[in-house]
Image: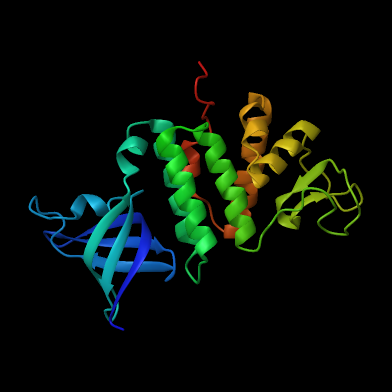
Amino acid sequence: MPTYRDEAVILRTHKLGEADRIVILLSRRHGKIRAVAKGVRRTSSKFGSRLEPFMVADVQLYQGRSLDIVQQAESLGAYGADIAADYDRFTAANAMVETADRLNDAETTPEQYLLLVGGLRALSRGEHAARSILDSYLLRVMSLSGWAPSLDDCARCGSPGPHAAFVAQLGGMVCGSCAPAGSPRIAPSALALLRALLAGDWETIDQAPHADTAAASGTIAAYAQWHLERGIRSLAHVSDFRPEGAR
């Protein structure tokens, strides 16, 4: 059918002409969509504010040759304003949608869509430290995309852990025999935090000391960017984040 409906997260937008906008969406059933929203930059537009980054909407689109056309948009989750009001949340959200954009050039799953929606909702409500929400999202979405890190057995030879070295290029924790010279080592407490972030164990995550949070964040950033085969530009702005409430 030329016309279809879906739930979607707005990842990014670009100006087109004097009043239109190109909208990049991650949808629940149709994957990543590139569409034109006509007239949304006019003050009289009825749904322009519903098609801003970090918003979740029920959209109706018409299939075009190169770009689809947005016909209707109803808000399902207005997260943009609360995220944009806080620098930590805003930069974390940017890193999340940039990652989602990179991962879903080919195909997506409903689980990836729901994970992103849940992460943006948690950011908008300030449920946990923005840095921790981002780290948990990165680990879990990489796993859903087929790149789950090995956090117990050796990623190369399968020998049972615990092991001390984490090598992103090899897929996670590696034993002493498989670890290349100079491989970065990770403390047991930071490794336990990685497991909690992957499992969504927020009681453990929220109680983690800052040193473990920083170590886990660096490990996750290296792992995600290696498998994406290029840097996540937004991560440069989250590298110095502190947990919410820190001074």
- When the figure is inspected, residue 137 is found, relative to residue 215, above or below; the finding is below
Q: How many marks?
A: 0
Residue 182 can be seen in this image: no
On the rendered structure, is 170 left or right of 121? right
Q: Give residue 239's position: percent from left, percent from top.
A: 53, 35
Is 185 or 212 nearer to us in this picture? 212
Say which residue appears at 30% left-offset and 38% top-offset.
Answer: 81
- When the figure is inspected, residue 43 is found, relative to residue 70, above or below; the finding is above
- When the figure is inspected, residue 64 is found, relative to residue 174, above or below; the finding is below
- In the displayed image of the protein, which residue is found farthest to the bottom? 1
Q: Give residue 186's position: percent from left, percent from top.
A: 77, 37
Q: Give residue 44's position: percent from left, percent from top.
A: 7, 53
Is 157 or 108 nearer to us in this picture? 108
In the rendered view, how is the structure colored? rainbow
- In the displayed image of the protein, which residue is found farthest to the left? 44
Say which residue appears at 68% left-offset and 30% top-offset.
Answer: 212
Residue 37 can be seen in this image: yes
- When the figure is inspected, residue 177 is found, relative to residue 186, above or below; the finding is below
Say which residue appears at 52% left-offset and 31% top-offset.
Answer: 129
Query: Where does the N terminus fall, quadrant-wise?
Result: bottom left
Say which residue appears at 52% left-offset and 59% top-offset.
Answer: 112
Image-quadrant location for residue 162: top right
Q: Give residue 25's position: percent from left, percent from top.
A: 36, 61
